[in-house]
């Protein structure tokens, strides 16, 4: 079984070890993150939200390509690091970072064109609550991009079940459908890729934000 200390740090980086965890996150998740950013398809007019940005691997590309990027993370230490690392973009009001959770996003309705989150669904208390909030903050026609390693692969790693809730791909897709998303697709760069990146759209004519 994976050490509880490492599992806790992955779910909520804190203290002196948070820098090591950021490095490990970036090293081991680089392919999934790069593929997720590709599927976000950021353009210069976009306002993009990344939920649980962790090691910050996606932030440079998103800030470079989008009009505005917001990052939310449960870890105060990670948020402090991001504010320092991207201080220029923050001072220019092209980026902002804050603590928060997917179940209670600190933004108004229809605030973003795109929302991205990678390797966070294991820590959500509720897929339904999380996707309802993502749906709420997305503009009509907006895109949600969710990357994760499905249950059959995650379970082999032996993470403590009270810290990691592994997710079946169909459970994520079904929760997106319940939230009102359409055009849901499960994407992988190759058939043998173990992880998924799911793309979903908030319909132009659908539920109110």
Image: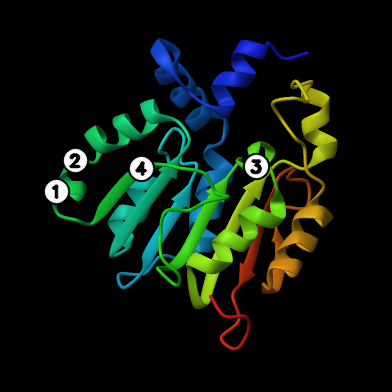
Q: Mark 3 or 4 closer to N-term?
A: 4
Using the numbered discs, state the Cα–Cα distance from disc 2 to disc 4 in whole angstroms. 13 Å
Task: Please report contact status of discs 1 and 2: CB closer than 8 Å, yes or no.
Answer: yes
Q: Residue at x 68, y 41 (%)?
A: 125
Give the side of residue 152 with respect to residue 176, left or right. right
**Label ID, residue 87:** 2
- Secondary structure beneath dot 3 equals loop
Residue under numbered circle 1? 91
Separation of marks 1 and 2 at Cα, in angstroms: 6 Å
Distance (Cα) linking label 3 and label 1: 31 Å
> Where residue 45 sits: x, y (%)?
31, 73
Which mark is in front, 3 or 1? 3
- Residue drawn 33% across the image and 44% down it: 97
Q: CA distance from mark 3 to mark 4?
A: 17 Å
Return the residue found at the far bottom.
205
Q: Is residue 115 above or below residue 9?
A: below
Residue 206 seen anywhere in this rendered image of the structure: yes
Q: Can you identify the residue that label 4 sits on?
A: 98
Residues at marks 1 and 4, CA–CA distance in whole angstroms = 14 Å
Measured along the vertical axis of the image, is residue 199 above or below residue 4? below
* Residue occupying the point 55% across, 20% down: 9
x, y percent for residue 70: 36, 53
Q: Secondary structure at mark 4?
A: strand
Give the alpha-carbon distance from disc 2 to disc 3, as whole Å: 29 Å
């Amino acid at each position: 079984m994976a050490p509880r200390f490492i599992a806790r740090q992955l779910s909520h980086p804190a203290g002196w070890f948070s820098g090591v965890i950021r490095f490990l996150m970036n090293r081991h998740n680089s392919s999934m993150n790069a593929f997720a950013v590709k599927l976000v398809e950021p353009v210069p007019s976009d306002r993009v939200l990344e939920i649980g940005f962790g090691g910050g691997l996606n932030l440079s590309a998103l800030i470079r390509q989008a009009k505005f990027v917001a990052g939310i993370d449960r870890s105060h230490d990670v948020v402090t690091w991001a504010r320092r690392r991207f201080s220029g973009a923050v001072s220019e009001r092209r980026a902002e970072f804050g603590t928060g959770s997917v179940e209670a996003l600190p933004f108004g309705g229809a605030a973003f064109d795109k929302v991205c989150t990678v390797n966070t669904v294991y820590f959500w208390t509720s897929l339904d609550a999380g996707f309802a909030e993502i749906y709420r903050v997305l503009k009509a026609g907006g895109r949600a991009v969710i990357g994760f390693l499905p249950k059959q692969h995650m379970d082999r790693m032996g993470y403590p079940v009270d810290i990691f809730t592994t997710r079946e791909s169909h459970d994520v897709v079904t929760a997106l459908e319940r939230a009102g998303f359409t055009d849901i697709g499960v994407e992988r760069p190759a058939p043998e890729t173990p992880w998924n990146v799911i793309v979903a759209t908030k319909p132009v004519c659908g539920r109110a934000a």
